[in-house]
Amino acid sequence: MKRLIVVLAAVALLLAWWLWPAVRTTRPADPLAATGATAVDARPAAPPASRARAAPKDPAPLPPHLLAPSWLPDVLDELLKRAESGDVAAMQVLGVRLSGCEDDALHHLRQQLRDDEVDVFGMRAQAAASSAGAKGNLQRGQDRMRQMIAECEGVPELLRSSGLDWLAKAAATGYSQAQLNYVRTVLAAFRRLDQDEAVARIEEFRERRILARRYLADAVARCLPGALRLQADGGKALFDNRDRHAYRLNQAAALYAAQREEETQVPAGMRDDPQNLFNYLTRDLDEPARAEARRRGEAQFQACAGH
Amino acid sequence: MTRRSRYGWGVAVVAVCVAAGLLIHQESSRAPAARADGTPTPPSSARSPVATLPPAPPVPPTSPANAPTGHRADLEQRAAAGDADAAAELGGLFVLCRHYQARSAEELEDDVISGMADGEEPPRIAGTPASPELVTLIVQQSQSELDRRCSGIDAGKLRWEDAARAPALLERAADAGRVQAMLDYARYAFADYGDTEQLLADADEVIRRKEKARAFLRQALRRGEAQALLLLGDAYASGPLEKIDPARAYAYMSAFFESPAAQDWPPRLREGYLQALAQRLDTTQIARARADGEQIYRDFQAGALPQ
């Protein structure tokens, strides 16, 4: 019996020795655990305790000829071949480039072009008075839209809707750039839909939102460039809105954090008046709630300051 | 500037669903439905056992004499007291009549032509833009029914906030067994959403309403309401409650055209609508869809849900 107790004690000591350093040094496996956000209860990511977490190693970059502005139909086969063989960078580039070729994206692009042409026609009488610069900008915009349409039309129809899936695949490997692009692309794709389209595809996007929340929370915890701004822009769609007060407060905190970051990056004359935006977003909050939003936003900003 | 064309054609899209008395609950339009055991299904005005609210006094018909304010105030009061009939009428009125205008057939035709000339995008039927003639016929067909339901209503006094109350009113009335509310809910369950980001933020609720709207349509069908055939046809043709399926749309629409409720549809409109759907089908698929439509109508007459 005594022998058994000694053996058990030794096993316990060994376990403690084995576990203790891991507890102190290993990141939580679930990134959400570190950020305070969960897929169900997505609050703005809580600032990391001391410093941003290290990102997993990013994949080697692709050869330049595969990146924009290369003509997508010309490089599609090579991108696909690389992506299918597990090249994460190729998955990411393919995902981003194809996401603009979804049916609804093309449809809206064509409509936008048509609208612009109608507007140009309507403005023709004023054309002489409008500046050459404005006309040039309009023309360049239209040329760009025509180019995007032609590029997508050169992609086989079956592949055009696979952009988000390629991005999801790249993001699932932990590639931070792909994760941020996944969040951006999900938001952009959903915003492009009209109400009927959005209702029709809500089940798909509810699933995508779960991933987007997780990736965004992780990106903020890692202080990835652009993460705070993305959190501010996407909070309306991504934060949990079951508690309306907390939802507004979280949105305000996210905006404040992004604005504080931009104060350090963008010259004053080139950014919107932060106070106006913040006041607008917090118009339904009382002063203590606004102060709380500023405090949380400041904490998020400070946690990433210098990264 | 992006022109939200599909919203611009909102009236026309609504028209697809409201045409031929969809928005008017016509007792005479019901098929002689029967329960599975062969006993006749009571007309929905008999308010069968589904009703959960206390019985309400009959709703007086809307007329210029007592509308808008007096009648509306009365409806508000009764709806607040739990009257499901009042909730159904109020919800329908809020969502349907806000943009109502009395228009002649010629004026409507001019509206359609001007809209297309301005680059507005026509509603899509199974992914194909409807022809100007078809849009005109649809809009004209719906107008007389809107006239009957909305005449005497001061549309200028209806605000977005009113329309936003409609889904809850309609759901309550539909839960209490009011068939017209079931039909209205199927089309306007999301009338209180202003932008697509809110839909994503509320994804769980949107999915709940979507499932409920689909269930209401099938319930209305079992109750012998031919307009449910039309709405199901429209859902398969244009979404968002069902996945777009031109063959199913063709089957349901042709079943609806068999019913007495469709007999005041001009032949050109019926043919035009089916032709629009047929553009996406080959001859074998069309033949099968016709046969399915006949079966659906037989099931409908027998009070059974289509397979």
Image (cartoon, coloured by chain):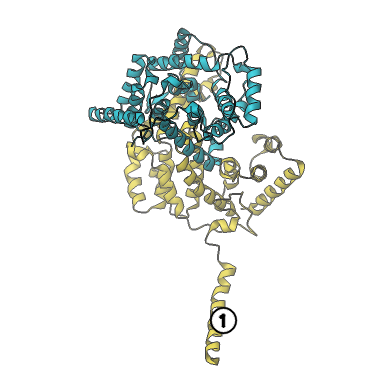
Chain colours: A yellow, B cyan
Looking at the image, the residue that sits furthest to the left is B284
Q: Is residue A138 left or right of residue B281?
A: right
Tell me, yes or no, if residue B87 can be seen here.
Answer: yes
Disc 1: which chain? Answer: A
Above or below, comparing residue B266 to residue A212 in the picture: above
Q: Nearer the viewer, residue A300 or A82?
A: A300
Location of the C terminus of chain B by quadrant is top left
Tell me, yes or no, if residue A62 can be seen here.
Answer: no
Above or below, comparing residue A50 to residue B1 in the picture: below
Q: Nearer the viewer, residue A82 or A29?
A: A29
Q: Percent position (x, y) of residue B194? A: 57, 31
> Splitting the image into 4 quarters, where does residue A104 fall?
top left
Q: Percent position (x, y) of residue B241? A: 44, 34
- Residue bearing mark 1: A13
* Number of residues whose C-alpha sits closer than 10 Å to that of mark 1, classed few (under 14), some (14–19) or many (20 or more): few
Looking at the image, the residue that sits furthest to the right is A287
Residue depicted at 40% across the width and 15% down the height: B137
Looking at the image, the residue that sits furthest to the front is B39
> Splitting the image into 4 quarters, where does residue A126 fall?
top right
Q: Nearer the viewer, residue B114 or A159?
A: B114
